Image (spheres, grey):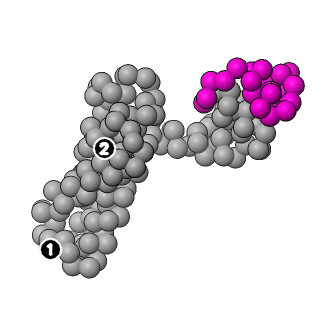
Amino acid sequence: MDSIEALTDLIRQERGALVRTGRREGLSAEDAVDCAQEAFSTFLQLLQRGGAPPDPAEWSPYVTTIARNAARNRRRRRHVALPHDALDGDAALSGDDSPEDLLAQAEEHVRLRACVERLCGTQRSVVMLRMLEERAGEDVATVLGISRGHVDVLLHRAKASLRECMAE
């Protein structure tokens, strides 16, 4: 088996464990998935430079350590002690979710963020202020310099666009 095949097998076998490692380090599901991907990327660079063990059976501890360090560094950069993007409140902290569920939630979260980014500027601003920051409609209208009714219309249209985008 060549090193690329061995690395592919390692990714399939260890990705869930690496996501769990990121979650235990206090990251959101999305950030934990990012750390797992970062760990595999870093390990691939080590492998190409000859800095990793030649035996694929010894790769798992290296990748786990890289993921743990990446998660800790990411958490430190954000000055966050606990997951900041818990998808279901405290349920995301309970540990009841399988790694596959966490990956699916994180992937859905990433898709939703991409759909929000596809909205026009004003709709995106309304969604960010009204839904994510949970600001009052009057406050959003004042901030954006539009009427309260227009905020409601933009929010309604944005939600329809988001539903359509997520269904694609």
Front position in the image: 127 or 33: 127
Front position in the image: 130 or 2: 130
The quarter of the picture where residue 61 lies is bottom left
Query: Which mark is on residue 22?
Result: 2
Residue at the spot x=32%, y=60% of the render? 40
Characterize the local packing of mark 2: few (<14), some (14-19) or many (20 or more) Cα atoms within 10 angstroms.
Answer: many
- Element type at marker 2? helix
Is residue 91 shown to the viewer in this render?
A: yes
Image-based side of 134 in relation to 55, left or right = right
Dominant secondary structure of the residues highlighted in magenta in the image: helix
What residue type is disc 1 on?
Pro
Q: Quadrant of the C terminus?
A: top right
The x, y position of residue 108, in whole percent, is: 51, 38
**Disc 2 or disc 1, which is closer to the eye?**
2
Q: Is residue 39 above or below residue 82?
A: below
Q: Quadrant of the N terminus?
A: bottom left
Residue at the spot x=70%, y=46% of the render? 118
Residue at image mark 1: 54
Say which label, 2 or 1, has the lower sequence index: 2
The x, y position of residue 25, in whole percent, is: 28, 41
Q: Is residue 55 above or below residue 20?
A: below
The quarter of the picture where residue 155 lies is top right
Residue stretch in magenta: 132-155
* 152 falls in the magenta region: yes
The x, y position of residue 128, in whole percent, is: 66, 34
* 148 falls in the magenta region: yes
- Element type at marker 1? loop
Residue at the spot x=77%, y=32% of the render? 143
The x, y position of residue 94, in whole percent, is: 30, 24
What residue type is disc 2 on?
Gly
Query: Which mark is on residue 167?
Result: none
Residue at the spot x=38%, y=34% of the render? 83
